[in-house]
Image: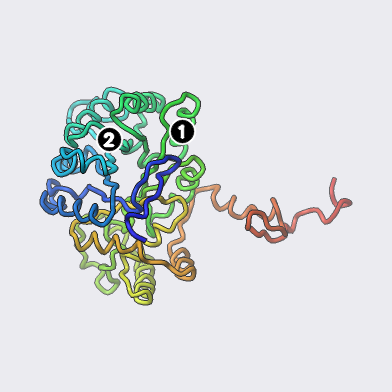
Amino acid sequence: MSLNHYVTLGHSGLRVSPMCLGAMTFGDDWGWGASVKDSEALIDRFVERGGNFIDTANAYTKGHSEKIIGDHVGRHAERRDRLVIATKFLSNLYPGDPNGGGSHRKALVAACEQSLRRLQTDYIDLYWMHAWDASTPIDETMRALDDLVRAGKIRYVGFSDTPAWKCVEAQMLSRFRGYAPLIALQIEYSLLQRTVEGDLIPMAREFGLGVTPWSPLKSGVLSGKYKRERHGEHQAGRGAWATSALSESTYTLLEEMEQIASALGTSVARVALAWVQSRPGVSSTILGARTLQQLDDNIDALDIRLDPTHIARLDELSKPSLNFPADFIANGAPFVHGGMTVNGRAAPPWPLAPKGDADRY
């Protein structure tokens, strides 16, 4: 498989590469990240290998990430039109201005206009709400987004980092009122962040949202560079984002990943990415590379096919604790179809079931 084996994003006809180039690393304005020149090289290599999906946000490196994309791609119509450019609104770039951020109409429309200017384009392919704004009614957000679609300034709509119940409310509003629907969901998802499997992933699959995981390597923890014997020596570029995940169970998982990588002749990072990419509901995994070597290594994960026994072992070592009623529902099959198989799901007999007609009231 390669980057030019495109997939449709959620319940839409939009074709995107199975991996997405994340642009949070574009610009070193935050003290880490890729220089302008290196960021441009990352874009060129990604496109050269068949990628067409780039993801950024108005807040990334204080707007510089969008400007880098605009300078290198947006101003060149023949290059821009062949790419799917996604960006996000919500973050406030104007300290002291209460309307400088959020998902209400005033902030949303202003953020869109500013992103269009930085990206040097007439339209945004996919416009994400970066996170849920609890201070704004969701119907106001959805109506404003629909107006931007109708105006031709954005083409598709998605949500990032938003509770499942709020996504459902937004999607049902779009259905009943004829607004542009959500087509995608961007969430953190990795072997070290699987709690999304409780509500967010099933919701996305039910409502036609293509999942685009961010931080599939958990801020580099799953890259293979962290070792149990060196615990305490790690100085991660993302600080607590990474080091807080370095527990005994994480090291056990990493050691298993090293064994799988060795058996497949590949890297730990590729194993982690191949696992995420194989998950139900996932459309395109977001890569956050800062160097060409990292980017190439990550893209090559598309060539990895994990054996079912490998997946089962990784699943067991990374099994999350999900909120109620996830476990209750998972264990409820016996009293629904005990002793039978429905849709491939077998259930043991329910010990409390009536033994026959005479045992029922």
Read off the residue under disc 2: 124
Residue 228 position, x and y percent, is 30, 72
What residue is drawn where x is 41% and y is 36%?
Answer: 182
| Residue type marked 2 | Ile
Mark 1 crowdedness (10 Å alpha carbons): few <14, some 14-19, many ≥20: many
Residue 221 position, x and y percent, is 29, 62
Of residue 118 and residue 8, the one placed in the foreground of this image is: 8
| Residue type marked 1 | Gln
Read off the residue under disc 1: 171
Please state if 153 lies on the left or on the right of 32 as rendered: right
Mark 2 falls on what kind of element?
Answer: strand
Image vertical order of residue 157 relative to residue 27, above or below: above
Of residue 343 and residue 76, the one placed in the foreground of this image is: 76
Spatial CA span between label 2 and label 1:
20 Å
Q: Residue furthest front?
A: 78
Please state if 284 lies on the left or on the right of 26 as rendered: right
* Of the image marks 2 and 1, the number of the one nearer the N terminus: 2
